[in-house]
Image (tube, rainbow, N blue to C red):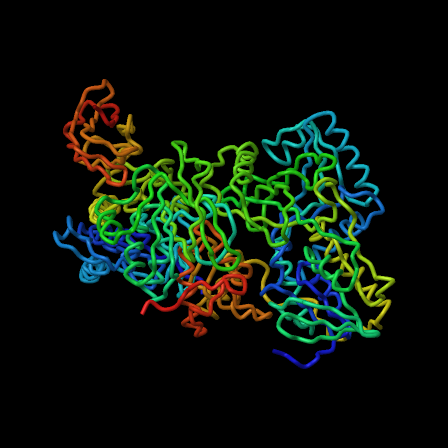
Amino acid sequence: MFKDEIKRDVVVIGGGPAGLAAAISAKEVGAKGVLIIERDKRLGGILNQCIHDGFGLHWFKEALSGPEYAQRFIEKADQIGVEVMLSSMVMAIEPELRVHLSSRKGLLKIRAKAIILAMGCRERTQGAIMLPGTRPAGIFTAGAAQNLINLQNIMVGKRAVIMGSGDIGLIMARRLTLEGCEVLGVYEILPYPSGLPRNIQQCLVDYGIPLHLSSTVTELHGQSRLSGVTVAQVDEMRQPLKGSEKFVECDTLLLSVGLIPENELSRSAGVELDPISGGPIVDDTLMSSVEGIFSCGNVLHVHDLVDHVSEEAEKAGRFAAMLAMGEQRPAREFIPIRPGKGVRYCLPQRVSGTNDFTLSLRVISPMKDKRIVIRDQAGKKLISKIYPRLHPAVMVRIGVKGEKLAKVKALEVEVEG
Amino acid sequence: MAADIAQYDVVIVGAGVVGCAIARELSKFQLKVLVVEKELDVGMGTSSRNSGVIHSGIHYSPGSLRAKLNVQGNFMFEELCKALKVKMSYIGKLTVAQDDEEIKTLYHLKEQGEANGVPGMEILPPEKMELIQPGVQGKLALYTPSTGIVCPYTFTIRLAESAHLNGVKFLLGTQVTGITRDGETFQISTHRGDRLTTRVLINSAGLYSDAICRMLGIDEYKIYPCRGEYLILDKRFGHYLKTLVYPTPHHGKAGLGIHLTKTVDENILIGPSNEYVEEAEDIRTTKEIMGLLIEEGKRLLPGLSTSDVIRSFSGLRAKQTPPQVGGFKDFVIERRRDYPNFINLVGIESPGLTSSPAIALMVKDLVGEVLPLVKKEDFKSEIPGMVGYFHEQPEELKNELLSKDKDYGEIVCRCEGITKKEVMEAFQNLLGVKTLAALKYRARVMMGRCQGGFCLPRIVELLRKEFGVSPQELLLHKEGSYLFTGYVR
């Protein structure tokens, strides 16, 4: 059953929106063997369970559902001859660009000229936020509940509390309500919501679901099925305020408390990670610290819009293909980009200085009428843009021209004013 | 339900590690044995909620049952785990002293260990400690190479499966509600209306052992549940621990102190804490203790952050000493004068897991005082299957298995690398337990860093497709722990 090593130009790990767009662009640029390895039975990734609309407003200039958005890429990939392996899971990546995978066909090894990491992210769990109390049934991450309801027609509960105001939690608040589950409220520990403003409006306000800011779930109750949760207001240090505790009777708790880029495979390949974004450190070609390994989408950093994922992935695919075909040599020297005041992280973390690139960043808290400024090592402003509203939930993207970086040694991006 | 009166030679109340070890030992003889357990699976109480350490036996006074059974049990583990296909490893332990007072305790422990027959102990200076566990801080340490680790619930399940393969019956999800003596036999009633009679009754009900005693009018025992909370860390820290590192225990404390324990699956546990609680079901975790554990963990493991915690849990020690007394009392393992056919086990807390094989031998001898023990010709010592999970097998074996069954090629639980085949086998387990927790404890699904976020929907899909399970039937762990309320429409 031992298989000889298979060889491909570009191997894309993950067949969600990032993997699809990256593979299509690699193929279009001219890479010959482009292979997507997907662990699920179908392509499309998390989009398959996102049956609400609002996808594609930027990319296709129309509102599509998740499956519709994915389908356009799936068809394109099929037309241009992107190769796909389904129900196949990559177990390890060697720094020498060898991929080990497990599939129904056997345990295979594939040698690639370039690898694109597009594994997406996972949801933060009850354990990771150390939620105290009992361990009854009825606690789900919002995404798992979304899968069960939308793909398997399974109802998770009758009276629900939602912890955290991430976008999936907001979408699920609406979804549960539409299916007859009473959603008692969304509890967000921060003084502002974590999800997009449009989701707050369309998923909570329009349905009369209360959003409790600076509030959180502090304890789980019930031995067999969840019988309720304790909720409390929190102070500036996010500590529960004594006396503000309240018992809320419910049988279901959905967690929407953050997404974590899924980089265990990247670690196995020796890819250096950014502790803040949670994803690989990349340059302007979206190449990681390991030559030949690229990354895009939510495995690189968590996006709020799939359209931006597609755009980023298209770029990763292009550069990976060029490297695989020998048309682009990796840069040896880089200009580092550092997040400064008011910026939580920015990406890419370093650039060659020769290409135009898009700088993606998130601010640390909501702000009004501020400037985002990019400076060089001498403090000289290269770019300065005014933003009437800045919000951590909304990724900021700034186009930077390579020609501006001729004599630049280091860059810093910060919020000013 | 079953209105008929079923007759047994031996009924064991409680399917924790001790009850299951006894069941397996007795399954070597021509006896009709039944295990009654209130939970839906074996090992759901204290047996699955501990550090999973096979202790060396330095902590208990020479001559005590705890000392004797601990050391004897420790010796028995390797062979037993081999037969039961359970991962275990003697990874050793450093008990570290930070000051002169603790150094005195170390020497005392070593002497005690010698008297108890603990092999290979050494007192080590810092430079030698460093060779065994880089980064360990302390003035002096006692090294006990015979300390080991095992997965406590896998061990319990395999003991039960082995017993089952050799003819022992298990009545799970069944609570004993009353016991009466009728001449030479006991009559047992359960909450499901079963009527059982048995010639020998064994109480291994752990946290409820005093309640079982009271059913027989024995009032001299009381169990004080003492909770220990733990945090489970991501596997990426597993490589950090080469051996176990414990602080030197202090007199009068109920446990052995908060420490790091590596599990056989490469996670690290921080814990356990030590609080007496009112109820034997109170396995909550608390904000206060979790905060304390993470602080302690950060001290012991540089680079640890809160986001490396994948889950918290707690377990209860079945203590015989009230909070104001603390400390340890010896195990009670007795054949009663007032009830000669009643074998009573009370207060089997730490080192209960380690001692379980030796306790089983001792109980077998007590049974032999009452019933003739005739060996079975066809006792099967080994159970089928492999040690560890598919992904842990050597490459050639994996390829061979996969060529015979393609379900080994499909990964269901991505964090732990568990295949569809393993999930299906776990669902078809020998004891017939159909809860989701049964899959967790047997196939390790949902136990990784995503805690089922990815695999729960896939497992549900698989159970529906392969076994026709309807979602409303699915329970998490207990009676009433339904996962879903129905179909959307």
**Percent of width and height locating residue A178:** 27, 61
**Left or right of A223 on screen, residue A173:** left
Give the image quarter of residue B387: bottom right
Work out whether residue A21 or residue A210 is closer to the camera in this orientation and state it.
A210
Work out whether residue B476 or residue B268 is closer to the camera in this orientation and state it.
B476
Asked if residue B404 shows in the view, the reply is: yes
Residue furthest to the top in view is A378
Asked if residue A113 shows in the view, the reply is: no
Give the image quarter of residue B48: bottom right
**What is the quadrant of the N terminus of chain A in the image?**
bottom left
**Percent of width and height locating residue A323:** 25, 44
Work out whether residue A138 or residue A249 is closer to the camera in this orientation and state it.
A249
Residue furthest to the front in view is A243
Residue furthest to the bottom in view is B4
**Left or right of B124 on screen, residue A375:** left
Q: What number of labels is visible? A: 0
**What is the quadrant of the C terminus of chain A in the image?**
top left
Residue at 36 percent of width and 40 percent of height: A278
Give the image quarter of residue A71: bottom left
Residue at 75 percent of width and 45 percent of height: B57
**Percent of width and height locating residue A104:** 40, 65
**Percent of width and height locating residue A63:** 16, 55
State whether residue A159 is above or below residue B255: below
